[in-house]
Image (spheres, rainbow, N blue to C red):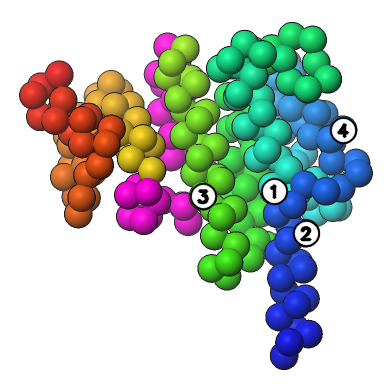
Amino acid sequence: MRGLLLAVVAAGVAALAGCAEREPAALAHAAATAVAPGGGPAAAAAELTADFNTKRVTVGGAIDRAVAMLESAATGTPMLGETTPVASVDATVFAAAVLDFCGAVEPQLPKADEFYVIWIKMGRLAFRAAEEAHAAGRVNESAALVFRGPKRWQNDGYWYQYPDHDALAAVILARTGNRAEAIHRLQSRIELRGPAQEVYEMLMRGQ
């Protein structure tokens, strides 16, 4: 039994940790596919899925790459080893691909409670990508990102822990013609905190 448990844990760690020697090059190639003519999120997600199945990339590594690209775009600072910052749209398109990839390989990921952190990382990636697109004025793109990826991270515990994401989701819903849904989702919370409470009050004032 102990041996079986160790095997499960080892498999989970391998799926989550970005440690493959070939991973950086594979992720860079997928990022290029995401923004190439004839490429896009679907093509990049398929490439990532194939690389995951051949152990060239990991979920954790792909998420980390996407976050680094978003950070570069948001701060105007080049990624390590690069000379220019990542363009905002390049960062969000790759984030979309990574979230779609996460959805594609979801059945292969560990479900045990000790691996819940990976689902949180997916939710935070969806938040940061939607935030970047929204800040750049690409509201429709932000709407396509804010709930993207597996549904496992979208639960009451996540929304309570991260009211910034809950608030952004409501703002985006309201700005895309779904104001009633925005209000309803916040009204359904047992408790609103921080930015979620502020956005709810703003919506109720008709702003």
Tag 4: Cα neighbours inside 10 Å, few (<14), some, or many (≥20)?
A: few
Type of the residue with mark 2: Ala
Residue 25 at x, y = what percent?
A: 87, 33
Pointer 4 residue = 25
Q: Nearer the viewer, mark 4 or mark 3?
A: 3
Res 198 quadrant in image = top left
**Image quarter in which the C terminus is found:** top left
Q: Is residue 139 above or below residue 12?
A: above
Label 2 crowd bin: few (<14), some (14–19), many (20+), radius 10 Å: some
Label for residue 120?
Answer: 3
Q: Is residue 137 left or right of residue 62?
A: left
Which mark sits nearer the N-terminus, 4 or 3? 4
Q: Nearer the viewer, mark 1 or mark 3?
A: 3
Q: Residue at x 84, y 52 (%)?
A: 55
- Left or right of 11 in this view: 23: right
C-alpha gap between disc 2 and disc 3:
18 Å
Please identify the quarter of the rendering in which residue 77 is found. top right
Check disc 2 and report the residue beneath it: 14
Mark 4 or mark 2, earlier in chain:
2
In the image, which disc is placed on residue 33?
Answer: none
Chain part drawn in magenta: 137-161
Residue neighbourhood size for the residue with mark 1, other residues' Cα within 10 Å, grouped as few (<14), some (14–19), many (≥20) = many
- Left/right placement of residue 168 relative to residue 40 reads left
Q: Residue furthest left?
A: 205
Give residue 59's mark: 1
Q: Is residue 37 above or below residue 47?
A: above
Q: Which of the two discs, 1 and 2, labels the residue nearer the N terminus?
A: 2
The answer to whether residue 154 is visible is yes
Amino acid tagged 4: Ala
Task: Residue at 75% x, 77% y: name it.
Answer: 6
